[in-house]
Amino acid sequence: MAASALSNRLVSPISLPSKPKPKAISLQPKFSLVKFPNTRFHPLSRKTTSLTTFCSSDAPQHDTPIELRYPAFPTVMDINQIRDILPHRFPFLLVDRVIEYNPGVSAVAIKNVTINDNFFPGHFPERPIMPGVLMVEAMAQVGGLVMLQPEVGGSRENFFFAGIDKVRFRKPVIAGDTLVMRMTLTKLQKRFGIAKMEGKAYVGGEVVCEGEFLMAMGSE
C-alpha cells in the first residue's frame, strides 16, 4: 500500500510556474500630449489625419502670398481732388483718400496714420497714439467733403466746425493704423447754413471714435 502511494506521487505531474507571455511591442512612435490654446480639436483626435496637421498651427493655409491676398481701398477721390475741395494744408490736412462718395449725403475716407505724423513726437514719445481731438478734426474734414458741394450750397471760404456732441473714444489709434471714417448728413437747415452730421471712425472694422457733428456754412 505504501509502495503504491509512493508510485502515485512519482507518476503525478509536477506543476511548474508558467512563463509570462511576452508583451506586444508597438512599432508606432509615441507622442506626448501637447495642449494648444484656442484649438477646436485635440491634436491626437480622429480629426487629425497626419503628423503635419499635428505640428501645424491653427492659421489657415493659403496658396496666395499675404501681400497679394488683400485688395487695396478703392480711390473715388485722390489727394489732389481733396485739396481742390478742402482749404486745409500740411500739417493739418488729415484725409488721404475718399473711398465712397455721395455728394450732399455721405462720404467714407481714410487717414493713413504713420509714425512720421508730426504729432507723434509729443503724443507720446514712448507710446505713439493719435490724439482724439485730431481724430475728431479728421472726421470733420470728411464732413466738409460731403457739404462743400454745389448741391448743398457750401463754400470753402465760409465753412466752419461749429460743435460736437456725444463723442466717445473707444480704442486708441496708433502708428501703422488705417483710420476709416464715415460721415453722414442727418439734418440740414439750409436757410441758416447749419448741418448736423453723424460720424464713426473704424480701425480694422472696429469703432474707435463716434459722435455727432455740427457744421456751419455760408453761401459764396
Image: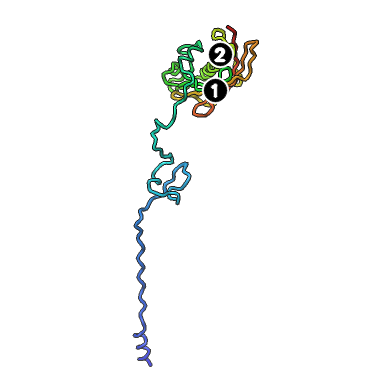
**Disc sitting over residue 95 in the figure:** none
Q: How many marks?
A: 2
Label 1: state its secondary structure.
Answer: strand
Residue drawn at x 35%, y 80% as measured from the top left: 14
Q: Quadrant of residue 18?
A: bottom left
Pointer 2 local density, CA inside 10 Å: few below 14, some 14–19, many at least 20: some
Front-lying residue, 83 or 138: 83
Disc 1: which residue: 182
Vertically, is 57 above or below 170?
below
Q: Amino acid at mark 2?
A: Gln
Label 2: state its secondary structure.
Answer: loop
- Considering only order in the chain, which callout, 1 or 2, is on the residue closer to the N terminus? 2
User: Which quadrant would the N terminus be assigned to in this image?
Assistant: bottom left
Inter-mark Cα distance, 2 to 1? 17 Å
Vertically, is 169 above or below 25?
above
Tell me if 157 is positioned left or right of 46 in this view: right
Q: Position of residue 158 (x, y in %)?
A: 57, 8
Q: Position of residue 203 (x, y in %)?
A: 50, 26
Tell me if 196 is positioned left or right of 178 in this view: right
Q: Position of residue 182 (x, y in %)?
A: 54, 22
Tell me if 113 is positioned left or right of 188 in this view: left
Front-lying residue, 9 or 107: 107
Q: Amino acid at mark 1?
A: Arg
Disc 2: which residue: 149
Q: Position of residue 35 (x, y in %)?
A: 44, 45
